[in-house]
């Protein structure tokens, strides 16, 4: 079974406006509400690809209820630990350029953390845990490491999509897949990642540090894939970016879904990139139809 763990889910409030003038009243031309948070997006894309998963993490308040009901309506299994305070609302502003304001998230009690860890003990060999996104500011910074340790003990594989220290602490546990974007990779090594060669060079260091499969996404420049033996670059299809929110999460879901189907990492990477672009070209997440349309346009090059 695949489990996704979103410690800090959200309601994403996607707002389209004309030019924003600070200090005045601005009005929207269109707005959309969607459940968000990295693991939750992965579960939603997996569901649309016909792959079962269970979404877990912490949810609370009216926003938490909205997220859970939305997921259940779509047929995503859920097993969230309930918390007192409201799940956060993240603002995704489309005023020409995309601007995001992600909130801190609710207070999480020790009791809730304990319940979550108990849940993680239930995973076993053959299971995957996708641990993704930020942690509420009230949580200990060691939480990723604590959970990965539990999973390693049970034999479950872990996939990590997180920034900075959260990623640093778990690399040694040999995650099955990690997917930083080029900003996150640059932040990790404290340098700018300016293109494909750089992304491959520094992605290889993440493989040396323990990750089995590394995808570095480069937005309109595509993505690179590195494992112990291969390095590839994928170009992205041309199209109009409607909202890139969830594009990275779609890549994770696309890779896993295709890998489980074929066992072929190169094809899984191609599918992953098509999934990312299919989401970038939509308001909301990709659909299987859109991915299939874009797939032939993703060109993969060996890069040694
Ligand atoms: N301008 C674009 N054109 C085509 N595809 C895009 C574009 N921007 C993003 N994507 C797709 O979304 C993926 C993830 O985008 P990126 O911004 O790098 O990640 P994240 O959403 O994690 O920050 C890219 O690898 C690509 O497949
Ligand atoms: O947990 P974080 O880092 O604040 O990110 C949460 C945000 O990321 C998203 O999961 C989208 O992630 P990507 O664009 O990287 O795929 C949103 O749904 C959510 O608002």
Image (spheres, rainbow, N blue to C red):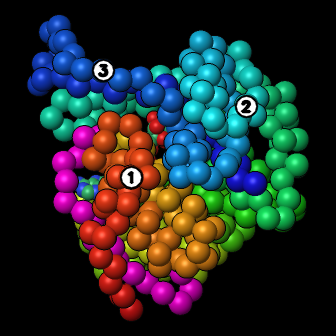
Return the residue at label 3: 31
Q: Is residue 166 visible?
A: no
Relative image position of residue 70 (x, y in whole percent): 56, 25
Q: Nearer the viewer, mark 2 or mark 1?
A: 1
Q: Quadrant of residue 55?
A: top right
Q: Are marks 2 and 3 in contact (CB under 8 Å)?
A: no
Q: Is residue 252 visible to us here?
A: yes
The first of marks 1 and 3 along the sequence is 3
Could you say whether the residue bearing mark 3 is in a helix, strand or loop? strand
Q: The magenta stretch spans which residues?
A: 227-243
Foreground pick, 141 / 67: 67
Callout 2 touching callout 1 (CB < 8 Å)? no
Q: Which residue is mark 2?
A: 80
Tell me: 79 left or right of 225.
right
Q: Is residue 229 magenta?
A: yes
In screen coordinates, is 300 left or right of 34?
Answer: left
Report crowding for label 1: few under 14, some 14 to 19, many 20 or more residues within 10 A (C-alpha): few
C-alpha distance separating marks 1 and 3: 24 Å
Instruction: Give yes or no for residue 294 being in the magenta stretch.
Output: no
Q: Secondary structure at mark 2?
A: loop
Q: Quadrant of residue 138?
A: top right
Q: Which residue is mark 1?
A: 289
Measured as percent of width and height from the top left, residue 45 is found at 51, 47
Q: Report the residue at 48% width, 87% height from top.
A: 230
């Amino acid at each position: 079974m695949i489990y996704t763990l979103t410690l800090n889910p959200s309601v994403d409030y996607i707002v389209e406006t004309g030019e924003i003038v600070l200090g005045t009243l601005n009005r929207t031309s269109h707005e959309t509400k969607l459940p968000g948070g990295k693991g939750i997006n992965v579960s939603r894309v997996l569901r649309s690809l016909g792959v079962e998963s269970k979404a877990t993490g912490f949810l609370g308040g009216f926003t938490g209820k909205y997220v859970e009901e939305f997921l259940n309506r779509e047929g995503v299994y859920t097993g969230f630990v309930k918390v007192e305070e409201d799940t956060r609302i993240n603002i995704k502003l489309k005023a020409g350029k995309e601007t995001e304001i992600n909130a801190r998230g609710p207070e999480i009690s020790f009791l809730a953390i304990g319940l979550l860890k108990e849940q993680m003990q239930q995973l076993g060999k053959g299971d995957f845990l996708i641990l993704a996104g930020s942690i509420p500011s009230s949580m200990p910074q060691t939480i990723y490491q604590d959970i990965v340790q539990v999973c390693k003990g049970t034999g479950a594989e872990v996939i990590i999509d997180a920034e900075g220290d959260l990623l640093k602490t778990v690399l040694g546990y040999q995650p099955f897949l990690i997917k930083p974007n080029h900003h996150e990779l640059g932040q990790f090594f404290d340098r700018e990642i300016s293109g494909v060669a750089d992304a491959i060079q520094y992605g290889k260091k993440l493989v040396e540090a323990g990750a089995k499969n590394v995808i570095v996404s480069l937005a309109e420049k595509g993505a690179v894939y590195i494992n112990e033996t291969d390095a590839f670059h994928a170009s992205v299809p041309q199209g109009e970016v409607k909202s890139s929110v969830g594009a990275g999460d779609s890549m994770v879901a696309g890779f896993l879904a295709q890998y489980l189907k074929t066992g072929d990492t190169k094809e899984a990477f191609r599918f992953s990139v098509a999934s990312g672009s299919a989401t970038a070209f939509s308001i909301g997440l990709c659909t299987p139809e859109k991915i299939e349309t874009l797939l032939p346009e993703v060109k993969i090059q060996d890069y040694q």
